[in-house]
Image (spheres, helix red, strand yellow):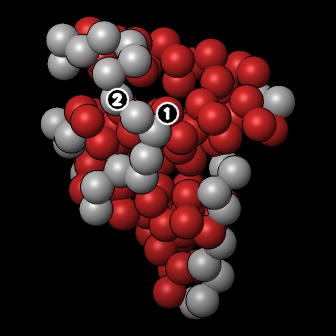
Amino acid sequence: MREALERKLAAGHDTALLRFSLGIEYLEEGDFEAAIRHLERATQQNPSYSAAWKSLGKALLEAKREKDAVAAWKIGIETAQGRGDIQAAREMSVFLKRALRRLNLPPSSTKAGSPRR
């Protein structure tokens, strides 16, 4: 599947959905840095793509970039709420709370912002 998606990208079909799909493939394969690259691109191409923000946070967390994951999920939650995507906002809120506990930070200790690149 990933190879077919990579061929589409190489052919010039660079869309947020394609980047999201590639990010998910790489995430499932355990290549977190490649997943992050594609998911960041998906969020750049479509900043309101709440599923991409959710997956970007997961990839960042797996890459041991907890603070960046927190930032991605905060943006994702705001994005999802703005679009009325309540389920995605709830899921990211749970992920965010877990990450903050892992970092020993209170829920209000970090501000929303772009994940470091």
Q: Is residue 6 left or right of residue 50?
A: left
Estimate the x, y position of residue 29 in percent, counting from the top left: 31, 45
Q: Image height check: is 101 above or below 92?
A: above
Q: Is residue 20 visible?
A: yes
Seen from this angle, which residue lies furthest bottom? 11
Q: Image height check: is 62 above or below 87?
A: below
Residue highlighted by disc 1: 74
Residue highlighted by disc 2: 110
Q: Image height check: is 105 above or below 23?
A: above
Please count the marks in the image.
Answer: 2
Q: CA distance from mark 2 to mark 1?
A: 9 Å
Residue drawn at the location 60% of the way across and 89% of the way down? 12
Q: Earlier in the sequence, mark 2 or mark 1?
A: 1
Residue drawn at the location 49% of the way across and 33% of the way down? 74
Q: Mark 1 is on which residue type?
A: Lys
For the residues labelled 2 and 1, say whether their Cβ atoms are less than 8 Å apart.
yes
Seen from this angle, which residue lies furthest right? 84
Q: Residues within 10 Å of mark 1 (few under 14, many from 20)?
A: many
The disc placed on residue 101 is: none
| Label 1 element class | helix
Residue drawn at the location 64% of the way across and 82% of the way down? 13
Q: Mark 2 is on which residue type?
A: Thr
Q: Is residue 15 left or right of residue 6?
A: right
Which quarter of the picture shows residue 99? top left
Which quarter of the picture shows residue 47? bottom right
Q: Please name which of the two marks, 2 or 1, marks the residue nearer to the observer.
A: 2
